[in-house]
Amino acid sequence: MSDIRSIRELVADLAARKIGALELTDHFLARIDAHDTALNTLISRSAEPARARAGAIDNGEAAGASLAGLPIAHKDIFCTQGVRTSCGSRMLDNFVAPYDAGVVERLAGAGTVMLGKTNMDEFAMGSSNETSFYGPVRNPWNTEYVPGGSSGGSAAAVAAGLVPAATGTDTGGSIRQPAALCGVTGIKPTYGRVSRYGMIAFASSLDQGGCFARSAEDCAAVLQAMAGFDARDSTSVERAVPDYSDALAGQGDDFLKGMKIGLPREYFAEGLDAASRQVIDTAIAEFEARGAEIVEITLPHTDLAVSTYYVLAPAEASSNLARYDGVRYGYRCDDPVDLEDLYTRSRGEGFGREVQRRIMIGAYVLSAGYYDAYYLKAQKTRRLIAGDFIQAFEGVDLIAAPVTQAPAFKLGEKLDDPVSMYLNDVYTLPASLAGLPGMSVPAGFVDGLPVGLQLLAPWFEEARLLGAAHAYQQSTDWHTKRPAGFE
């Protein structure tokens, strides 16, 4: 069985009974057994429930559903009823969710088969997938390198062909960055487009669910099933969801003709690796060759994005993670002598170093005397960053930019240098602060490691984003490449 067939082809074969859901499930479970020891992409496997679900689909359950029988994996930040949901942390190592997240419900309703839960940076705090309690994920293109984070397990699993698609979350770039470093396609939709119900919170005003797959066409099919209003999520937007797959199916060769694509000069300045810049320039030239008009734009507050994010996100994290205290659920220390000891040791032993660092930063910027100086000022700066995009999109249809300053770095290279690690997200943070939809599409390689092109669109214009990415992938084959040993 070929492992590079598109989701459309797999779903068509399933519907035509050319292949059974159980047969397809067993195929991907076998690939996980064969390859995941080397990659560590999964925290939990759901082999027997997956086989039972696939067998039921073969017997008519979910007949007519858009993704009936398609195997997927969920980032371990989404609650899954009866299956451990750890968030990559010792704190939740023993937590079995009593309900399904909104995203899990929707994808199950579309007929998918969950094979397991993917590894991630602890509580989604990281850019390399090295802060997980369950050990680092390795990049399938070179296992000495990181896959990116925090959704590195999902990106690496798709890149290695262990699953056709996987869910992820993006708070400051955690879908786009690992998609770029692993050579797959990843989309972060507009904030509020996908339900956050049952998605364990890191920074509530930034977290947004999305997905990974091999191509824009595949992402469109998965996002179609994920997106939509959820009354249980107060940040969910009640707005109609276009038919993304139909939009791509009816797309002609002239989709990009006349489209204005902006290149922010701040993203192409000092700091961008020269070899990566060459890959990005070549990708942009392809858009131009297909009829797009390339114009230079400016996003003048870009240099404030990193400092703004690392005030706001830790502040929200310190509030969201206060609930993990060893009392009601989660990790509890042994033999506490009193309540203070219970709180102190449970949190000290249950949280890893990076999570503790961000909780402390967040508590500091929210404390009396510092709220106005840091948190309030960061909120005002966030508005300025969003304003830059509003102004830019008055003159362009899309924005194209790098995803990262360079390809993947080696495991351990930046683990003890948090500032260097944080700067890895310099090109993805602005769009997250503004709540914009964004994608990473494979654009080439540097020294055998993938490089991604970032595309950004105005709010709720995921169809435009997917259409442009799909048009680019019709004339390039970077998204079809598979790392050696995982063909």
Image (cartoon, helix red, strand yellow):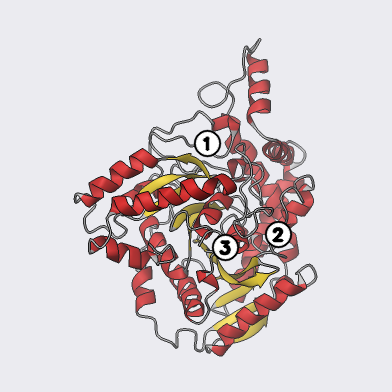
Quadrant where the N terminus is found in the figure: bottom left
Q: Residue at x 73, y 54 (%)?
A: 410
Q: Closer to the observer: label 1 or label 3?
A: 3
Which residue in the structure is indicated by mark 1? 86
In the rendered image, which residue does mark 2 sit on? Answer: 305
Per the model, the C-alpha gap separating discs 2 and 3 is 33 Å
Q: Earlier in the sequence, mark 1 or mark 3?
A: 1
Q: State if disc 3 and disc 2 touch (CB < 8 Å).
A: no
Q: Amino acid at mark 3?
A: Pro
Q: Disc number at residue 160?
A: none
In the rendered structure, which disc, 2 or 3, sits on the residue that comes first in sequence?
2
Whether residue 43 is situated above or below residue 447 in the rendered picture? above
Residue 3 visible in the shown view: yes
Relative to 458, say whether 117 is above or below.
Answer: above
Q: Nearer the viewer, residue 402 or 68?
A: 68
Q: Position of residue 460 (x, y in %)?
A: 46, 66
Question: At 55% across and 55% down in the image, what residue appears?
Answer: 156
Report the disc number at residue 483: 3
